[in-house]
Image: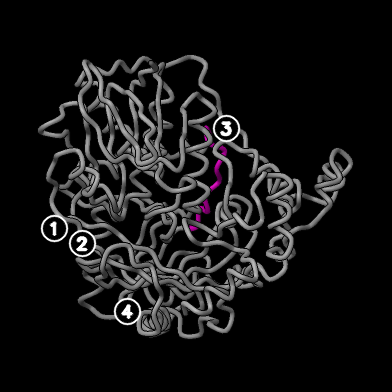
Amino acid sequence: MKVYDVAIVGGGVVGCAIAWYLAHCSLDILLLEKQEDVCCGVSKANTGILHSRSYWTPGTLKGEVHLRSLSWFERAFRELGLSPLRCGALTLAFSREEARHLEVLKKRGAIAEAAILSPKEVLAIEPRVNPEIHAGYFDPETMVISPFALTIALAEGAALNGVEICCGKEVVAAEPSGRFLRIRCGDGTVYHARFLVNCAGASAVHLARNLGDSLPPLSFFRGQYFVLDRECQGFVRCVLYPVPTEKSKGILVAPTPEGNLLLGPNFEPTQGEDTATTRKGLLEVERGVQRLVPDVPLDRVITTFSGVRPTLPERDFLIAFSPSLPCVLHLAGIESPGLTACFGIAEYVGELLARRGLPLRERNDFRLRVPSRAFRECSLEERECLIREDPDWGKIVCRCEEVTLAEVKRALRANPPARTLDGLKRRVRVFAGRCQGSFCGMHLPRILENEGGIPVHGLRKSGPGSFYVLRRDEVAAYAEVR
């Protein structure tokens, strides 16, 4: 019987960050994710902003782990092979009252290069900004990263260093078994571990209840977004914020590392994990964005999406041991800035586990993740070299994003591997371009069958039931149901 030192439940950015952090030590780590892939829950749908010190929350656990995380950034980016967009941010005030809040942000951040700017100075940096602004706060330390790229890099970096990642495993129960925990999954699989870390995101409270604990109830808030075509790259250079409120940081405009422009999110209560987009919500985003940038090119929208944030009544993070099972650690209410704070959360969790007896002996053979460059980022000479080595590099599968067959094959053989179309999208950007899969969607089913062993009629877009190809009899049955 194998006994893991730590079993982590949840393959979002926090769960993967904890796995990667603990992989620096000589430990046996298991990560269990109920979905078909990592980054399938709350982590997959957010703005991807790495917030600076200006946006930390004093006097809270949320604020503490946020500040801790900032000191991890450069080391983490180096070890994971990531390059965030170092674009900075402008917070725009449209009245004297809002301008006073800019002073609060500047004082809180205490960033030497940060500055409160006049309208003329703001327009010199971002000429498309609404000229009716009263003032702006420039924060040079804000960065943007793909939440997919970060989460998947953490998972791959953890797996490279021995973490066992098992997807499609929903934990339904855990009970003491001698000196260990016996962890049972919905498919009947049983694992044993010394510690269990509940990072189940939107399902964290439900899992805690299954383990016999009662956590405060979660409230869910939905945020809707527009995604603009990559031809809008350079339309703005900085992240553009309104003055934040107690509820959220507001509807913003954000460039992305891939070149798209992201608009949103709004902030609306919703029931559970409802990620539908609505006309009302998107109109709210449109109005909010046009207040910041009146001529934002909404005719270049290629898709919309929404994400949810699970929020506790106190609007703070909960990271605490179970009162009934001393070897179970619960994390709940990890909303914004959870992406920014993931490294600080991982460090904090490691310290809590060490106090309960987990030996954190740093290993001397930790392996760095070395990512491969995307074909679209290579020079002509580099492309020719790749194609000479493997002709699959010359076979374009996705025209919009210039994704090659070689890149798709690599994603199917990664650890953890892509097993759905959305899993491929998050790794290599098929389905992410202007045509939203009109071209690559015709070819990928056969490629996944031939190279990934996934039958065409079993291929899913994302989770259970999202079959991409239906037989004729299935289409007829579906039409009758509709």
> Nearest the camera: 465 or 77?
465
Q: Which mark is residue 369?
A: 3
Q: Residue farthest to the right?
A: 388
Q: Are marks 4 and 1 in contact (CB under 8 Å)?
A: no
Amino acid at circle 2: Ser
Density class for disc 2 (Cα within 10 Å; few <14, some 14-19, many ≥20) is some
Q: Indicate left or right for 456 with 415 as reference.
A: right
Foreground mark, 2 or 3?
2
Density class for disc 1 (Cα within 10 Å; few <14, some 14-19, many ≥20) is few
| Placement of 430 over or under 215, stated as above or below | below
Label 1 residue SS? loop
Q: Residue at x 30, y 15 (%)?
A: 359
Examine the structure image and report whether residue 307 is included in the region drawn in magenta.
no
Quadrant of the snapshot with the N terminus: top left
User: What residue would you read off at disc 2?
Assistant: 219
Q: Is residue 136 visible?
A: no
User: What residue would you read off at disc 4?
Assistant: 134
Q: Are marks 2 and 1 in contact (CB under 8 Å)?
A: yes
Marks 2 and 3, how far apart at CA? 37 Å
Foreground mark, 2 or 1?
2
Foreground mark, 4 or 1?
1
Q: Residue at x 44, y 64 (%)?
A: 239
Q: Is residue 388 visible?
A: yes
Examine the image and state in which quarter residue 275 appears: bottom left
Percent position of residue 63, x then y = 23, 47
Percent position of residue 336, x then y = 31, 55
Marks 4 and 1, how far apart at CA? 34 Å
Label 3 residue SS? loop
